[in-house]
């Protein structure tokens, strides 16, 4: 009898152990699936929450390069008040927005190694800054930059790694004006040109020492600039401004103190500002309704 029991124990032991192992294996698989499912859910929720916060706070900025230009596309849930950008440590350039939600702009890429800093400001005053680096060597050809200055002029800046022979430019397919490279620095030509009144097409051609040619065109509107006359009358500074359309604003700084005169629809404004004894330093900027600007920098008036 004892032998029968022992025989039965030997047969039944492994079977029950296998069942226990299988049971725990299935339980572990189910538990693992539950844990994995919870972990995935948590990651998805976390990702979605982050995306929603980003969409609520920051604009969507897409910056793409196309040869010598940068295409900037910005979309925001709030009205975009202002967009500025600069290359390296240069002066800020402004992109007009008109409080729109979507803005697209093409920016010329400068020659060499450059860092673009772009700042977007929304209607609530929130600012978002984006920084990106680019390299442009021209692939053996000259690189042309056409920049609109605050004075409503065009700055033609051409660079070449090997050296330039000359550039030439024309307005509206008229006669070409030629600028030869300076023998002391053949790698750059930097020229400032006036824009004719009205809508115009500027075409620029650059030729380097290897006779490689680059051309670029720009559509731009020329506007009239206001007239600014300044005189000293005893211990007063007299600022006289005229414009054919209307004066938008007069900004001036006298001895570090800033002043502003809103023009409204006035075509003529004359303003008298009292001077101090001794040397007075003045800077003046006038803008008309068309965007034409005239400036006076580092003016000095002396009251004895």
Image (cartoon, grey):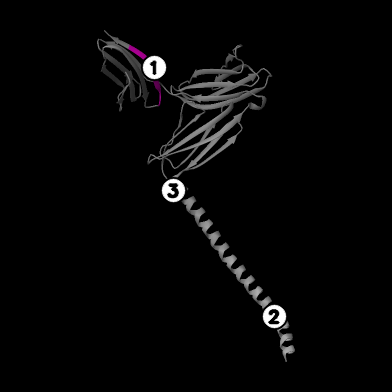
Type of secondary structure dominating the magenta stretch: strand
Label 2 sits on residue: 13
Residue at 66% in and 77% down: 19
Q: Which residue is mark 1?
A: 297
Q: Residue at x 74, y 85 (%)?
A: 7
Q: Earlier in the sequence, mark 1 or mark 3?
A: 3
Quadrant of the rendered image containing residue 160? top right
- The residue at which mark 3 appears reads as 56
What range of the chain is rendered magenta? 291-300
Residue at the image position 58 percent from the left and 67 percent from the top: 31
Q: Residue 227: horizontal and vertical position, in percent?
A: 36, 17
Q: Secondary structure at mark 3?
A: helix
Pinpoint residue 218: horizontal percent, then vertical percent: 54, 27
Is 202 on the left-hand or right-hand side of 100?
A: right
C-alpha distance separating marks 1 and 3: 43 Å
- Classify 10 Å Cα crowding around label 1: few (below 14), some (14-19), many (20 and above): few
Is residue 108 something that shows in the picture? no
Residue 209, position as x, y percentages in the image: 67, 17
Dot 3: few (<14), some (14–19), or many (≥20) neighbours within 10 Å?
few
Q: Secondary structure at mark 2?
A: helix
Residue 109 horizontal/vertical position (percent): 56, 29
Q: Quadrant of the C terminus?
A: top left
Q: Name the residue: 46% across, 35% down.
A: 119
Is 296 a magenta residue? yes
Q: Is residue 3 visible?
A: yes
Do residues under tags 2 and 1 come within 8 Å of each other at their CB atoms?
Answer: no
Q: Is residue 293 left or right of residue 139?
A: left
């Amino acid at each position: 009898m004892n032998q029968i029991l022992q025989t039965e124990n030997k047969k039944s032991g492994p079977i029950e152990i296998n069942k226990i192992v299988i049971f725990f294996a299935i339980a572990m698989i189910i538990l693992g699936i539950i844990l994995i499912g919870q972990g995935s859910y948590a990651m998805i929720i976390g990702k979605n929450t982050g995306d929603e916060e980003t969409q609520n706070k920051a604009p969507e900025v897409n910056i793409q390069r196309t040869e010598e230009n940068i295409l900037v596309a910005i979309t925001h849930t709030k009205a975009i008040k202002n967009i500025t950008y600069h290359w390296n440590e240069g002066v800020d350039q402004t992109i007009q927005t008109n409080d729109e939600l979507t803005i697209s702009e093409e920016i010329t890429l400068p020659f060499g190694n450059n860092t673009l800093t772009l700042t977007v400001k929304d209607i609530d005053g929130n600012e978002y800054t984006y920084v990106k680096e680019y390299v442009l060597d021209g692939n053996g050809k000259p690189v042309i930059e056409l920049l609109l200055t605050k004075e409503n002029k065009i700055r033609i800046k051409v660079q070449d790694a090997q050296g330039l022979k000359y550039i030439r430019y024309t307005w509206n397919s008229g006669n070409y004006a030629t600028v030869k490279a300076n023998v002391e620095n053949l790698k750059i030509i930097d020229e400032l040109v006036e824009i004719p009144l009205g809508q115009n097409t500027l075409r620029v051609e650059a030729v380097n020492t290897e006779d490689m040619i680059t051309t670029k065109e720009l559509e731009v509107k020329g506007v009239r600039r206001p007239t600014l006359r300044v005189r000293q009358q005893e211990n007063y500074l007299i600022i006289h401004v005229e414009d054919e359309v209307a004066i938008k604003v007069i900004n001036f700084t006298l001895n570090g103190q800033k002043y502003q005169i809103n023009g409204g629809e006035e075509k003529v404004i004359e303003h008298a500002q009292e001077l101090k004894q001794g040397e007075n330093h003045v800077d003046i900027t006038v803008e008309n309704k068309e965007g034409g600007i005239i400036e006076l920098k580092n003016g000095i008036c002396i009251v004895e």
